[in-house]
Amino acid sequence: MTEDRNVYGAELEPCSTDPATGFLRDGCCRRVEGDRGRHEICAVMTEDFLRFSRAQGNDLVTPKPEFEFPGLEPGDRWCLCLGRWIEAVEADCAPPVVLEATHEGVLRDVDPDLLREHECEPQTGGDSGTE
């Protein structure tokens, strides 16, 4: 890891390596110069959000092998664009957020209380897709 920090100020944890996410596809929702979409929020996909994203013109379900994109399903973790997540909040379909894997840079644009309202419930066992 680098000096990237999460919203708690601790070391940024990986979001997912299966499927590989992040602007750099390195599993982390880090801030990257040149990433105009700001893929800094680690979220757990829901059926509602995936449907919303498709309606906004960003189909995250259909695999795109030419881009090594497997397509997402509910339960997958994915680094979302900050703006799309905010749109989903306003549309009442925002997916849960993994705060330990969400970059601290989002705090400039999103109130910490709003993030906590959408915090992902901790998993008890199972695979987070980060191994």
Image (cartoon, helix red, strand yellow):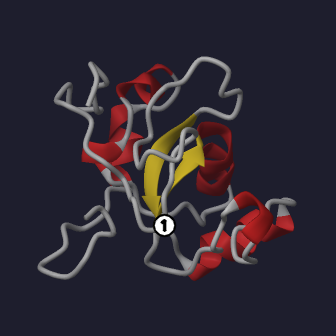
Residue 47 horizontal/vertical position (percent): 59, 81
User: Which residue sits at x=26%, y=31%?
Assistant: 1
Question: Considering the image in quadrants, where does the C terminus appear?
Answer: bottom left
Q: Which of 27 and 82 is in front in this view?
A: 27
Q: Which of 39 and 63 is in front in this view?
A: 63
- Residue type of the residue flagged with mark 1: Pro
The answer to whether residue 52 is above or below residue 124 is above
Q: Name the residue under label 1.
A: 19
Q: Is residue 59 visible in this depiction of the protein? A: no
Mark 1, other Cα within 10 Å: few <14 / some 14–19 / many ≥20: some
Identity of the residue furthest to the left in this view: 124
The answer to whether residue 29 is above or below residue 63 is above
Residue 21 horizontal/vertical position (percent): 51, 53
User: Which residue sits at x=28%, y=32%?
Assistant: 6
- Which structural element holds mark 1? loop
The answer to whether residue 2 is above or below residue 27 is above
**Number of marks:** 1
Residue 96 horizontal/vertical position (percent): 42, 62
